[in-house]
Image: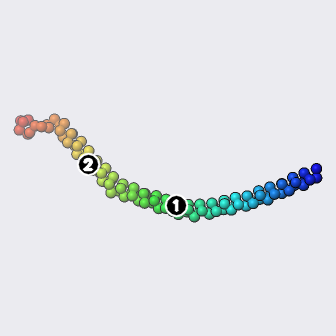
Amino acid sequence: METIRDIAIIILAVESIITGIVLIVLAWQVYRLVKTIREEVTPLIRDVDETVRVVKGTTTFVGEKVVSPAIKVSKTVAFVRRAAQVIADLPFAGRTMDDGQ
């Protein structure tokens, strides 16, 4: 009985040592992973931030230089078209001054 007990104690001690070594290796790997992520993610975030600023600037430029003038032209064309329709619908439209007298 004592021999079985001694063997069980030795097995548990070896298992504890192996578990401790595995935990140390695992902690080291987690440290390296966190370090790698920090080194890789920080430049990536910087690049994404720069890209967002460029897209924002491009959107502003396109809005000011393309969309706004197109809206103004469209508005003017719509105004001229409506004015022409109103003038065409007047009672004297299509008649000259001589026709009415």
Residue in the picture at 77% in, 56% down: 19
Residue in the picture at 94% in, 52% down: 2
Residue 60, placed above or below residue 96: below
Where does label 1 land, which residue? 44
| Image quarter hosting the C terminus | top left
- The answer to whether marks 2 and 1 mark residues whose Cβ atoms lie closer than 8 Å is no
- How is the model colour-coded? rainbow
Label count reads 2
Residue in the picture at 27% in, 50% down: 73
**Residue in front for this viewpoint, 84 or 97:** 84
At which x and y percent is residue 38?
Answer: 59, 62
Residue 4, placed above or below residue 53: above
Please, what secondary structure does the residue beneath circle 1 have?
A: helix
At which x and y percent is residue 64?
Answer: 35, 56
Crowd band around label 1 with a 10 angstrom C-alpha radius: few (<14), some (14–19), many (20+): few
Residue 65, placed above or below residue 86: below
**Residue in front for this viewpoint, 1 or 85:** 1
Where does label 2 land, which residue? 76
Amino acid type at mark 2 = Thr
At which x and y percent is residue 14?
Answer: 81, 57
| Earlier sequence position, callout 2 versus callout 1 | 1
Drawn side of residue 14 relative to residue 26, left or right: right
At which x and y percent is residue 15?
Answer: 80, 55
Drawn side of residue 72 relative to residue 53, left or right: left
Please, what secondary structure does the residue beneath circle 2 have?
A: helix
